[in-house]
Image (cartoon, grey):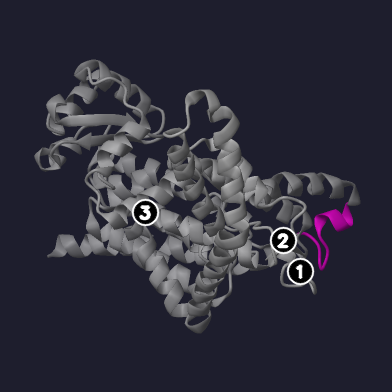
């Protein structure tokens, strides 16, 4: 079947071009803001050859096509409907009108963190390479690769510098994305974020070990000169204030004077408030959140790992999983590691294994092909084709996946597995794990591969015998 024919069938199945308010696409999915989702013929839609699944989330109706092909389908659909190519922001704005306040808050966090994710994931991969080079007991007993071959030491050092840049200047990345999301000038967001990690400030990671904290004396008020390396909340709140203040001033200052007045006033006001109020308050709140999350998992690691492993995939369906990226980054910034992200990697693997199990229980040739390709994709960290194209379509496969993920998550949490960074999910996820935790993590991977695969086959046979 041609791409054009598939595009025509998709348009018909979602209610025709008159039901499309806006449309765009991402790497693997068509994204629609539909006027009425109730008219979508989901069964017919998912029978189309190129369609690997469909679902509604965050006010958008999304159709899973696959990497590369989705571009071609989208362009054909634009020609057929004449709707014009909508920007991602336009469709997000159209979809946001249907969301409740909690969904909007989750969506806002997602819109802020997703654009900076490539930099963070790349940093995680590079830190993984550095871990291999500098970790002890990987290749040699009580020695690292650079200990045995010192000529590689500087090579590892440069990799570590490149990898750490995204985390060292994380407030700069968040400031750019957050101010842009809130409607301000993203360049001012970068300046704001970098200002919070300026070299003249005491490094946040040295805060606990420093005997005397340097201060500014501001009209009799002592303000601590502390940076906010690795922190999320301070720059998020400050970015919101900066963007809203900039918009406020632009409406009231004549165009001829805006260049001279808006940016200086905005940065001065936001900067002073960041160090006097926003920073200290949000830093304290972030520490409370971090201590609470860590405390829960320390008090009941088995239960925490089981619940998080069980709920992560369902949270992906709602889009709420994006909030945990902020928690991961906060944990890394405050403690130097995260115990949540390793469970995400196992969830990816579990979805892939459940999809792979479907390969052996279905007689549908199209589903066999989809099961295999989506399983490989999930093993490499891209779970949408497996989750939405296969596992959710056959609920028992999705249940098998989250059960395997829960048991794997419980195991690695009990064994204290931690990641130095956020990286690529799935099988390559071990690169972000501390080398001393690899053994336990590999066992967790084995659990997440075997249990969903076996359960999927067992559940399928039980259904046939009823």
In this view, the residue in front, 286 or 311, is 286
Q: Is residue 269 above or below residue 28?
A: below
Mark 1, secondary structure of its residue: loop
> Is residue 391 depicted above or below 210 in this figure?
above
Q: Secondary structure at mark 3?
A: helix
The span shown in magenta is 139-149
Describe residue 159's horizontal placement relative to residue 298 as left or right.
right
Between circles 3 and 2, the one closer to the viewer is 2
In the image, residue 370 sits, relative to residue 317, either above or below, namely: above
Indicate the position of residue 150 as horizontal and vertical percent values. Answer: 90, 51
Tell me whether circle 2 and circle 1 mark residues in contact (CB < 8 Å). Answer: yes
Mark 2 residue element: loop
Q: Which residue is mark 3?
A: 106
Asked if 201 appears above or below 163 in the picture, the reply is below
One can see residue 98 in this view: yes
Q: Magenta stretch containing residue 140, yes or no?
A: yes
In-front residue for pair 447/264: 264
> In 3D space, how far apart are the residues under numbered discs 1 and 3 (Cα atoms)?
36 Å
Kindly report the distance in space between the C-alpha atoms of the residues bearing marks 3 and 2.
32 Å
Quarter of image, res 173: top right
């Amino acid at each position: 079947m041609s791409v054009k024919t598939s595009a025509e069938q998709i348009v018909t199945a979602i209610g025709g071009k008159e039901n499309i308010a806006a449309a765009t696409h991402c790497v693997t999915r068509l994204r629609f803001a539909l006027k009425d989702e109730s008219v979508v013929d989901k069964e017919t839609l998912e029978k189309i050859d190129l369609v690997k699944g469909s679902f509604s989330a965050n006010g958008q109706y999304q159709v899973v096509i696959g990497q590369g092909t989705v571009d071609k389908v989208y362009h054909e659909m634009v020609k057929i409907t004449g709707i014009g190519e909508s920007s991602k922001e336009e469709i997000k704005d159209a979809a946001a009108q249907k969301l409740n306040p909690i969904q909007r808050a989750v969506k806002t966090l997602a819109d802020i963190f997703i654009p900076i994710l490539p930099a963070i994931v790349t940093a995680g991969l590079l830190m993984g390479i550095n871990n291999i080079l500098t970790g002890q007991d990987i290749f040699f007993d009580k020695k690292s690769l650079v200990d045995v071959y010192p000529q590689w030491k500087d090579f590892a050092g440069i990799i570590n510098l490149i990898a750490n840049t995204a985390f060292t200047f994380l407030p700069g990345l968040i400031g750019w994305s957050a101010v842009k999301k809130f409607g301000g000038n993203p360049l001012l967001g970068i300046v704001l974020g970098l200002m919070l990690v300026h070299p003249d400030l005491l490094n946040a990671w040295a805060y606990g070990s420093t005997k005397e904290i340097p201060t500014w004396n501001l009209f009799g008020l002592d303000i601590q000169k502390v940076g906010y390396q690795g922190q999320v909340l301070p720059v998020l709140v400050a970015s919101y204030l900066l963007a809203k203040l900039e918009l406020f001033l632009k409406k009231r200052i004549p165009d001829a004077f805006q260049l001279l007045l808006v940016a200086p006033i905005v940065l001065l006001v936001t900067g002073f408030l960041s160090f006097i109020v926003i920073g200290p308050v949000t830093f304290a709140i972030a520490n409370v959140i971090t201590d609470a999350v860590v405390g829960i998992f320390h008090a009941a690691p088995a239960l925490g790992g089981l619940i998080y492993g069980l709920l992560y995939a369902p949270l992906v369906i709602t889009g709420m999983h994006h909030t945990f990226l902020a928690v991961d980054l906060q944990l890394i910034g405050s403690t130097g590691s995260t115990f949540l992200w390793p469970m995400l990697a196992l969830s990816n693997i579990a979805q892939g294994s459940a999809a792979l199990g479907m390969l052996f229980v279905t007689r549908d040739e199209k589903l066999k092909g989809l099961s295999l390709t989506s399983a490989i994709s999930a093993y490499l960290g891209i779970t949408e084709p497996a989750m939405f194209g296969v596992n959710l379509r056959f609920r028992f496969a999705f249940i098998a996946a989250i059960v395997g993920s829960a048991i794997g998550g419980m195991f690695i949490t009990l064994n204290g597995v931690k990641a130095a960074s956020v990286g690529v999910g799935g099988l390559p996820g071990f690169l972000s794990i501390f080398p001393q935790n690899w053994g336990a993590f590999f066992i967790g991977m084995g659990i997440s591969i075997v249990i969903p695969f076996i359960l999927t086959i067992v559940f399928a046979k039980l259904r046939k015998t009823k």
